Amino acid sequence: MTPTLNVDLLIIGGGVSGLWLLNRARREGYNAILIEGSQLGSGQTVHGQGFILGQPVIGPISPNDPGLKLLAQMPERWRRHLAGAVDDVDLSQAATLAERTYSWTLDSKKPGGFGIGKLFRRKSSVREATGTPVGETTELPASLRHEGFRGELRLIEGLVVDNRSVVAALAAPVMPYVFQNRGPAVKARDGAFNLRADGREPVVIKARKIVFTAGIGVTVLGCVPLHVWRQHMVMVRGAHLPDDLYVNAIDRDGQRRFNLTSHRDNEGRAVWYVGGALADVGSQFEPAQQIAACRKELAEQLPWVDLREAQFSTVRVDRAAARQRAGVAVLPVVREMGDAITAWPASLSTIPLLVDQVMDMLGSGGVRPEPGSLELLDDWPRPDVADDPWDQDGREWL
Ligand SMILES: Cc1cc2nc3c(=O)[nH]c(=O)nc-3n(C[C@H](O)[C@H](O)[C@H](O)COP(=O)(O)OP(=O)(O)OC[C@H]3O[C@@H](n4cnc5c(N)ncnc54)[C@H](O)[C@@H]3O)c2cc1C
């Protein structure tokens, strides 16, 4: 007979959503486990840019969207977790890359808009007048104080986190409850999941509630309708690059242009990670063509940075947004169907809200914590934390 394990809660997918939920659920006494089909954070999470903003990162969104008020509270909520001030999810071991972020209205305009706004055939209506104009006393990062700087800067309420370190900080206390599956887990006809690993008998997992925090994987497993589109992100590395840039650049007419975050690779070199509309519009480009487009944009906007010695590479990643009548959802979408909950966070920023909603659903659905043993899985393989895209093996740098 196939060994069977009964748990209160089975979480499928180990990005920030699943790991955050696992921390909360274990803390509240649920016999909860998480299954990951690849590496922790390997979906959108390690490919994200880590902006925790009190406003939407993608559009189009109605300025009357009631979700905007809740979104505005997110930076402060993350700050409390990062300071270790909230017991149930302690992010004090995660790294904050920037305490401030800027919206940069470029002093140039490209004909025609691009990006997700075009996908929905509507223009973002909340992009234009966000942020507080930078005053003479605002302390700017050195690389934005250059005399060659053109355009206008606004401070956006928010911060930037190092996504990989958030995954590692969330995983550390709950690793005994996190298990590797050989590839994406698939629901069997009877509703159970067979946990599989090379050279081992599968273990049947039966759960009172299953939660899909599988990122784009919810398009297969769950019941949240998503718009999925491909982004072609660019990485620029060089020991001489400034590492203090965290900007969302837009056109004078409010169209998104590019987002840039600064990181360090495993060898201590500065890495710029460039996305936003540049990554949307370049999704069809070959890497060399996308690199040329990015090089041109950076040379035009940051002419004082010497890019001659810099090396470039690209990575493609799927991005998605939940559809709703007035554009895309700014808040998490959590749906319950039978014994399964599908949880889509909308953005990294809103993951604490997603977890609140799932925990409320468990309580109101009558799923109470019950004691249980996980002995059967004591020596089961555990997933690693995924590398940042710029540290992944086999990447070609030009
Ligand atoms: C390029 C890019 C930039 C972004 N920038 C920002 C930003 O600056 N700010 C912001 O707020 N948001 C940003 N986001 C969005 C943000 O990164 C995501 O909303 C967030 O990381 C989603 O986390 P998640 O845990 O829900 O999903 P994911 O990180 O995708 O995790 C899902 C996990 O589930 C696993 N999985 C999938 N299917 C299965 C299965 N069947 N069985 C087992 N495991 C499975 C995957 O391997 C993966 O590890 C960005 C996204 C991208 C792609």
Image (cartoon, rainbow, N blue to C red):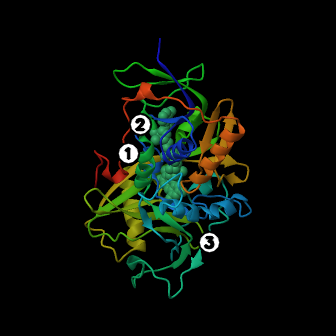
Q: Does the numbered disc 1 mark a residue whose Cβ is under 8 Å from ligand 1?
A: yes
Describe residue 154's horizontal placement relative to residue 199 as left or right.
right
Of callouts 1 and 3, the N-terminal one? 3
Give the quarter of the figure containing the C terminus: bottom left
Out of 358 and 372, give the one closest to the viewer: 372
Q: Quick one: SS at disc 1? A: loop
- Between circles 3 and 2, the one closer to the viewer is 2
Q: Position of residue 166 (x, y in %)?
A: 44, 54
Bin the neighbour count of mark 3 within 10 Å (Cα to Cα): few under 14, some 14-19, many 20 and up: some
Of callouts 3 and 2, the N-terminal one? 2
Q: Quick one: SS at disc 3? A: loop
Q: Position of residue 153 (x, y in %)?
A: 52, 77
Describe residue 89's horizontal placement relative to residue 295 as left or right.
right
CA–CA distance in space, label 1 to label 3: 34 Å
Bin the neighbour count of mark 1 within 10 Å (Cα to Cα): few under 14, some 14-19, many 20 and up: many
Q: What's the mark number on residue 130?
A: 3
According to the picture, the residue beneath numbered tag 1 turns out to be 386
CA–CA distance in space, label 3 to label 2: 38 Å
Q: Position of residue 83 (x, y in %)?
A: 48, 63
Any part of residue 380 in sight: yes
Residue type at mark 2 is Ser
- Between circles 1 and 3, the one closer to the viewer is 1
Residue type at mark 3 is Thr
According to the picture, the residue beneath numbered tag 2 turns out to be 38
Q: Is residue 194 above or below residue 308?
A: above
Out of 117 and 138, give the one closest to the viewer: 138
Any part of residue 276 in sight: no
- The residue sitting at 52% across, 47% down in the picture is 20
